[in-house]
Structure formats: structure tokens, C-alpha cells
Image (cartoon, rainbow, N blue to C red):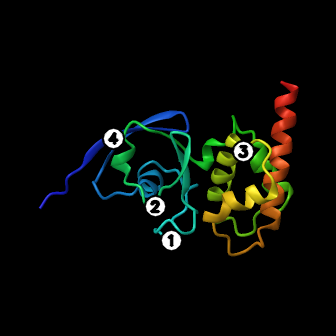
Amino acid sequence: MTQEYHDITLTVNGTERELSVRPQTLLVHALREDLGYTGPKVGCESSLCGACTVHVDGDPVKSCTLLAVRTDGAEITTVEGLADDGELHPLQQSFQEEHGLQCGYCTPGMLMTASALLEAEPDPSREEIRASLEGNLCRCTGYQNIVNAVESAAEKLSAQEASE
């Protein structure tokens, strides 16, 4: 019995990519195994941990529960797409400065979820930050430094916008 494949086109981090996937291929596996984007992590494969979070057409999505064929024509942003020409995004800088990570496994998903929050709400309260990150689990930190990092990034982005 032959496996049926579907040709799809994705724009990942600004670059159009074409690939053939089986109907049951999850987006996280297509990104990691077929396209080489290792930022999204395979954690729980049930949408509970958030390590696989990417943006699909601007919305944060847990890519472990989304079939790749459903994203044909979509614009995908992975954590690799946050940096701009080798320059860390202010959110990435803040995670580093505020020690918002330890082992780093959850960090890509945290960054993608937090970047969507900051896009929608440039000046979130600590409670809004915590609520936004509820679907992202971290087994190493107490979340305090992660919240501090998102808060710091909001300040950096606000100052950056004011200077433009």
C-alpha cells in the first residue's frame, strides 16, 4: 500500500517553502523534520505544554495538534523568525537578561506566546502576562523571571516605538 502525500506551500519566517506531507503529519513534525526548524519542540503532543507554539497567520497555535495540510498557504512564524537579521528580538533579549529560562525546552513556546500577547496588548499587567502564558508549562522556573522578562520586553518595545 502506498502512502498518499499532499503538496503544500508554507511561508515560514518570510521564506516560501514547498513540501509533500502525509495527511496525518502534524505541523510541528513538518517544521522540524521536513524543513529543519528546530525551535518548536515536541513535548506532550496533546496541546498541554505549549513547547510547540508557533504563529499561524499571526495567531499563536500549538503545532502538535494541527495537521500540516491544514496550513497550506499559511504564513508561519517560528521562534527562529523573531530575531531580525541576527539581532535578538527585545523579548529574546529580556528572557536572557531576566533569566527567564533554565533548560530552555519551553522557551520557544513561551517566546511565541508572549510575542503574540505583546502584539495584541503592548502594556500588559502582570496578571495578563500570567493568564496569557497559562497554556505554556515550564518545569524548571517558578515563572517569576518569565513574567519579569515579558514585562521588561514590553518596556523595551514601547521605548523602541517611541523613538521611531
Check residue 64 in the rendering and tell me which mark sits there, or answer none. Answer: 2
Q: Nearer the viewer, mark 4 or mark 3?
A: 3
Q: Residue at x 78, y 43 (%)?
A: 90
Q: Quarter-wise, where is residue 81 in the image?
A: top right
Q: Is residue 106 above or below residue 8?
A: below
Q: Earlier in the sequence, mark 2 or mark 4?
A: 4
**Secondary structure under the numbered disc 3 in the rendered image:** helix
Residue that numbered label 4 is attached to: 8
Q: Quadrant of the C terminus?
A: top right
Check residue 118 in the rendering and tell me which mark sits there, or answer none. Answer: 3
Residue 71 percent across, percent down from the top left: 39, 44
Residue at mark 1 to residue at mark 4: CA–CA distance: 25 Å
Q: Is residue 39 above or below residue 80?
A: below
Q: In screen coordinates, is 85 left or right of 148?
A: left
Given contact means CB atoms under 8 Å apart, are the residues at marks 1 and 4 in contact?
A: no
Kind of residue at badge 2: Cys
Q: Earlier in the sequence, mark 2 or mark 1?
A: 1
Check residue 69 in the rendering and tell me which mark sits there, or answer none. Answer: none
**Secondary structure under the numbered disc 4 in the rendered image:** strand
Kind of residue at badge 3: Leu
Q: Residue at x 86, y 55 (%)?
A: 97
